[in-house]
Image: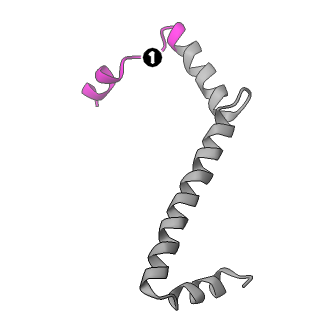
Amino acid sequence: MSTVEEIEKAIAKLPKKEFWKLAEWFDEHREEVWDHEIENDAKPGGPLAKLAKQALKEIDAGETIPLDEFFRNP
């Protein structure tokens, strides 16, 4: 199996029990991939670290407002 279309066809043929087993595996795998992505982005020099640094700079400069105040003023 080398294409998504072939994989989709194979999945469609699975017995119900096997389908749900695959669905559970896929959900867990997707979460692991997402967690790994976030961990990498949060490492020093990563995109999230850069955003955090910028946000802290803006907070220190008084360029922000508290979230509760933000949500009260549409």
Residue most extreme to the left? 72
Q: Is 9 contained in the magenta span?
A: no
The residue stretch that appears in magenta = 59-74
Q: Is residue 8 above or below residue 54?
A: below
**Horizontal and vertical percent position of residue 22:** 52, 73
Q: Is residue 3 above or below residue 43?
A: below
**Of helix, strand and loop, which one carries label 1?**
loop
The residue carrying mark 1 is 64
**Horizontal and vertical percent position of residue 73:** 27, 26
Q: Residue at x 43, y 81 (%)?
A: 17
Q: Amino acid at mark 1?
A: Thr
Q: Nearer the viewer, residue 32 or 72?
A: 32
Marker count (numbered): 1
| Quadrant holding the C terminus | top left
Q: Nearer the viewer, residue 3 or 57?
A: 3
In the rendered structure, the answer to whether residue 40 lies left or right of residue 67 reads right
**Horizontal and vertical percent position of residue 10:** 59, 88
